[in-house]
Image: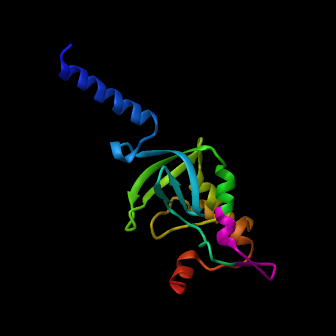
Amino acid sequence: MEMAGIVRRNVVFLLVSAMAMGVGPAWGDPFIVGIARVIDGDTLEIRGQRIRLHGIDAPESGQFCEKDGKQYRCGQQAALALSDKIGRATIRCEQRDIDRYKRIIGVCFKGDQNLNRWMVQNGHAVAYRRYSQDYVPDELTATATRIGVWSGTFEMPWEWRKKHR
């Protein structure tokens, strides 16, 4: 077999292998797959790539909320809830965009479960209507059932960020 054919076959093998291992955006694949590290309630890191969860906004790490007259660290609680949910499972994120901070904007899944939706359904994050309407119904359900941040009072994360920059 001629050298060009061998090289071509090896390149195809490498490309197919990379995609099977979950090597995403570098090869044009819209998925990032791997073990995730939780940065905060709406940001993950997989293989060194920051992924901001599309369509949701979670309280900031230093943000406090109030329930039954007592303050609690709702931002920290959101991050811990996401971390507990993910555990050491392989997470798959579908890239939707890239934000101004060069983070991937994505919808992430643990198996078939949409983690973005799960965060809003459980009151650990709100629907980020400025960018998407995808999770508004989930927020309405969380509000009606008074779950998570909706069980007390809190400031919307974007309003909190404005005041604490």
Residue 125 position by quadrant: bottom right
Residue at 46% from the left image edge and 70% from the top image edge = 130
Residue 15 position by quadrant: top left
Residue lying at the far top of the rendered structure:
1
Q: Taking 97 as reference, is 109 above or below it?
A: above
Q: Is residue 153 magenta?
A: no
Magenta range: 65-79
Residue at 53% from the left image edge and 77% from the top image edge = 158
Tell me if 2 is positioned left or right of 69 in this view: left
Q: Closer to the camera, 121 or 145?
A: 121
Quarter of the N terminus within the rendering: top left
Residue 18: % across, % down: 40, 35
Residue 38: % across, % down: 59, 58
Q: Closer to the camera, 88 or 59?
A: 88
Q: Taking 106 as reference, is 69 above or below it?
A: below
Residue 152: % across, % down: 74, 76
Q: Is residue 67 magenta?
A: yes
Residue at 80% from the left image edge and 83% from the top image edge = 69
